[in-house]
Every structure is written in C-alpha cells, then in structure tokens.
C-alpha cells in the first residue's frame, strides 16, 4: 500500500520540488542504473542543477521552449530535470522520428533550442537538424552543458503551468502537441506507483524511450518510493537479459509486445527462470489478450498487471497485484481517486488532474473535450460492478459489416488462444457488398504450420464467436508493422496494404 511518505511526496507542486524532497530523504540511494554507471538521488539533483546553470548560460529561461530528441540514457533524465529546475517548457521527441515529424514538432512548439544525440544508431541527428533548419541545436549524449548553480533564478513554484509538450504518433496526419503540467504528470505517475504496491527494495526498469509519456510517469514512481530503475538505451532480447539479471530487476514490462517477447525467451528454456529476481511484469499502452496474461503467469511464474493510459492521460487505470486473477486478465484495473470515468454510448470519457490541459491547436482542444470538461478518448468499454475498466476496442476499430458492429478486439482476443498465432491484428477493409469485410492479419510463431482461413474460422466457431463476425480474409505475415516506442501494431499500415485486395 502507499506509504505516508509517498503520499506526502505525491503532493509536491512541481517536478523539481519532488526531486529536491526525495534527494533530502535518501540522498545516497541509487535512482538510475545503466551498464556500470550509477546515479544517486542527490547526484540527480546536483547534476540537474549544474546542467540547468549551463543551459541558463546558453540563454534558456523560464518559459523557453526546448525540444530534445535523445535515447533512454542517464544524461537524458538529467537534461529533463534541469529543464524542470529552470521552469522551461520541454518538448520530448521520440528518437526514431525523422525529418517530417521532427520539423513539424519544432515549428509547432516554436522551440528555441533542440538537443540531439549526434550520430545514434547509424543516423545523424545533427545533420537532420541542419536539413530542417532546426533552431539552436546542441549535442547532449555523452556531455551536457554545465555551469555554476548560484547564477540560477528561483525554481518554479506553480505546478499548473504548461511545462511539457508531448507528441501523438501522427500515423495518419500531423502529430498533435499534447500540453501537460508538472501536476498532471505527477498525478499520472502517482497512480502507477500506488497501484503496483512497490517498495524501496524493488528495482525497476525503463526499456522504452524516456521521451515517451511513460518516461516521467516512471520517474515519478522512483521519486515517490525511493528505488532505482535500470535504463536500457536499446531493448532487444536476448541481449538485454544480461542487464536485467546483473542488476536484479524485480519489476519489468513496457507494453503487451514486451510481455510477448519475454514469454518467447522463457519458452526457449522453460524450466529455468528467465530473470530469477523478477516478480512483476507491468505495463500498458496496448490491448492485452487474456490468454497472453495467463500464459505469462503460468510459464514465467510472475504477476502481470496491466493498465490503460495515453499521451493525453499518462495513467488512467492500473491493475494491482492484489486484484483477482480474473480482473487482472480481463480488465485494465481501477482508476485512482480523482480520476473520473464516464461512459457515454460505450465511449470512455475522462476528467481529473492527470488529464492534459489540451493541445497546441485550440481547435483540437475544443473538439476533444465535451461541455462538462471530459476528454473524449475514442476508446470503447465499460465499468464492472467492482469499478474495474474493461476496454472493448476503439471507435475506429469497430468494423461495420452489413450494418452490424463488430469489435476487432473480441476476435483478436480469441485468436490469441490459437497455438499457431503469435500475434494478430483484425481490421475492416472496404467491401462493395458488405460495406466492410473482416480481415485477420496473423504473425505465426517460428516453425508453425501455415494457417488457413478455414482453420481460423473453425477455431473461432469453437470459441463461440457469432457467425457474422467470422473473418472473410486471412493474411499471414512474417512480422506485423509496429511503432518504435511501445511496439504497438500499426493497423493503418495494414489497411493501406490490404484495402485493394479482394478475397
């Protein structure tokens, strides 16, 4: 359960106040572990102040917009906290974004500075910045600007000013700039921390880009409970396992794809614990099939808690280790106190401190919130009598076949129970006769016999799926297209690929 100290720290007005209070409580405890490097809470505070002084000497002031596109690295966290110390507005950009998305983010946010890693993973970010005429660009990978902290102005005192601009994926249009405050991010991270029932003896892990909204979410958790996390600049299995084992990670995760990757590695040596110290997998960001939950718990011998969040609201609900197995497998957990969930015509709407203040574009803000101030998510679902949230899909994932609504998620969950299915995406494709037809795109495990449409529909019939929901088209692919953050399946690419096919 949340400790009194964690509750008290969670009431911090600003991110910097949270950093200072944790450093005063446990200055010598580690907060970040990476390879052979360790950073303590006091070193985080002091290093961020020195970096803030270096940024101040460059011209960064309270309210200055600073964009950064950096990998998950100790220096990245130091830079982010330095910007919170200054009261600047920071705009994290996912390291895998390229010219179009980066140029749009810099111009839309009116960034005055842009921090890049130079050449990273064989891509020259500095050259890209030159191509797109980025504002004042500096490399911040191995070395950060530093200076004398005595020159700094007082830290910000308000936690409700916009200090963060995050970017939606922009898969079918330009990205949206999502506006957050220190308080909205602290509220989201507090939900995650309290739901997972962690303690100072835990060791966490950040295997996703720190530039993702989950980055500060996770950092808040470390600051509230005073335990460290291992940072992974690149996440790939089995190579990353050495880091998990070396540091004795007790809590890992990221998203559904991460669970699947861990499970696949476990199955290579089913009688040996993959990570001996691991006791909990936790994450969110994508639907979680119940069968995957049960397989992870059964074969890896750990608990699995899954949550619901988005760039606009970093943590909405979270499963808790003391939930029933049924609730953990079939729901997204409960909302924390202060998060209001309203279901209108099966669509989920949200109001609370963790909800963003809106978008850079006022027209997008007006469209996203209803008259009562609830954010309209576009997600479909319902609340159970126990207060747990069940997601049933997204509005755009509702397939309308001959006038009947079909949930893609329902079919996907059932197909995940087939032994020859590693992952699946169900999409609707334009059809002159039906309006839309149901297409299942399947990724199979190595060595599996090729699936046929007949085998797929037979499995779904056996699971009790209504006949009108059965797929009429099957596509088998080597790998489903995914993004580079939480490894979400990009259904729009599948729709683009198969919309012209007729089966």
Image (cartoon, grey):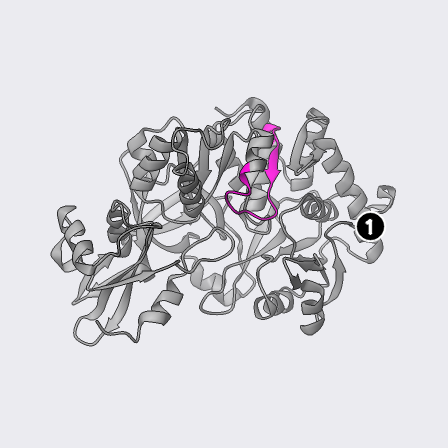
Magenta-drawn stretch, dominant element (helix, strand or loop): loop
**Quarter holding residue 12:** top right
Region rendered in magenta: 224-241
Is 60 left or right of 355, judged from the image as shown? right
Is 431 left or right of 301, judged from the image as shown? left
**Quarter holding residue 395:** bottom left
Is 159 left or right of 270, judged from the image as shown? right
For the point 54% across and 49% down, which residue is it?
213
Mark 1, residue position: 54
| Count of number-bearing discs | 1
| Image quarter of the C terminus | bottom left
Q: Is residue 238 magenta?
A: yes
> Helix or strand or loop: what does disc 1 sit on?
helix
Question: Which percent across, then down, holds residue 140?
Answer: 74, 53
For the point 69% across and 25% down, which residue is it?
26
Q: Is residue 446 magenta?
A: no
């Amino acid at each position: 359960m949340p400790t009194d100290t964690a509750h008290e720290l969670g009431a911090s007005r600003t991110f910097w106040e949270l950093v200072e209070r944790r450093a005063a409580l446990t200055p010598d405890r580690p907060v970040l572990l990476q390879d052979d490097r360790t950073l303590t809470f006091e070193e985080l505070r002091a290093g961020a102040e020195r970096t803030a002084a270096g940024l101040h000497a460059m011209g960064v002031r309270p309210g200055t917009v600073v964009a950064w596109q950096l990998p998950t690295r100790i220096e990245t966290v130091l830079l982010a906290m330095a910007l919170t110390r200054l009261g600047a507005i920071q705009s994290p950009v996912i390291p895998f974004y390229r010219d179009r998305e980066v140029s749009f983010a810099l111009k839309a946010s009116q960034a005055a500075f842009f921090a890049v890693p130079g050449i990273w993973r064989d891509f020259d970010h500095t050259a890209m910045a030159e191509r797109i005429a980025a504002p004042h660009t500096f490399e911040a990978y191995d070395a950060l600007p530093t200076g004398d902290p005595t020159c700094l102005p007082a830290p910000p005192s308000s936690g409700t000013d916009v200090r963060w601009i995050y970017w939606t994926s922009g898969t079918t249009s330009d990205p949206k700039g999502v506006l957050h405050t220190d308080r909205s991010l602290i509220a989201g991270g507090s939900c995650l921390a309290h739901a997972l029932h962690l303690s100072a003896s835990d060791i966490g892990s950040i295997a996703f880009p720190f530039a993702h909204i989950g980055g500060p979410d996770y950092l808040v958790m470390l600051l509230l409970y005073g335990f460290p996390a291992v940072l992974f600049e690149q996440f790939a299995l089995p190579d990353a396992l050495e880091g998990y084992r070396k540091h004795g990670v007790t809590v890992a995760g990221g998203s559904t794809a991460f669970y699947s990757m861990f499970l696949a590695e476990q199955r290579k040596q089913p009688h040996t614990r993959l990570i001996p110290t691991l006791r909990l997998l936790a994450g969110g960001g994508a639907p979680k099939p119940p069968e995957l939950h049960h397989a992870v718990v059964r074969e890896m011998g750990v608990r699995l808690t899954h949550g619901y969040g988005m760039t606009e609201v970093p943590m909405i609900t979270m499963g808790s280790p003391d939930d029933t197995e049924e609730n953990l497998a079939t729901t997204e957990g409960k909302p924390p106190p202060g998060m209001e969930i309203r279901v209108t015509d099966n669509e989920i709407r949200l109001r609370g401190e963790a909800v963003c203040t809106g978008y850079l574009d006022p027209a997008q803000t007006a469209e996203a919130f209803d008259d009562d101030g609830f954010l309209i998510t576009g997600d479909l679902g319902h609340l159970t009598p126990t207060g747990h949230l069940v997601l049933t899909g997204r509005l755009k994932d509702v397939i309308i076949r001959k006038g009947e609504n079909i949930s893609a998620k329902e079919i996907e969950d059932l197909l995940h129970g087939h032994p020859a299915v590693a992952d699946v995406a169900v999409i609707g494709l334009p059809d002159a006769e039906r309006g839309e037809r149901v297409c299942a795109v399947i990724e199979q495990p190595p060595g599996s016999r090729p699936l046929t449409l007949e085998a797929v529909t037979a499995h779904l019939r056996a699971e009790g799926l209504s006949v009108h929901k059965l797929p009429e088209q099957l596509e088998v692919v080597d790998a489903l297209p995914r993004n580079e953050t939480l490894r979400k399946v990009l259904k729009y690419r599948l729709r683009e690929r198969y919309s012209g096919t007729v089966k």
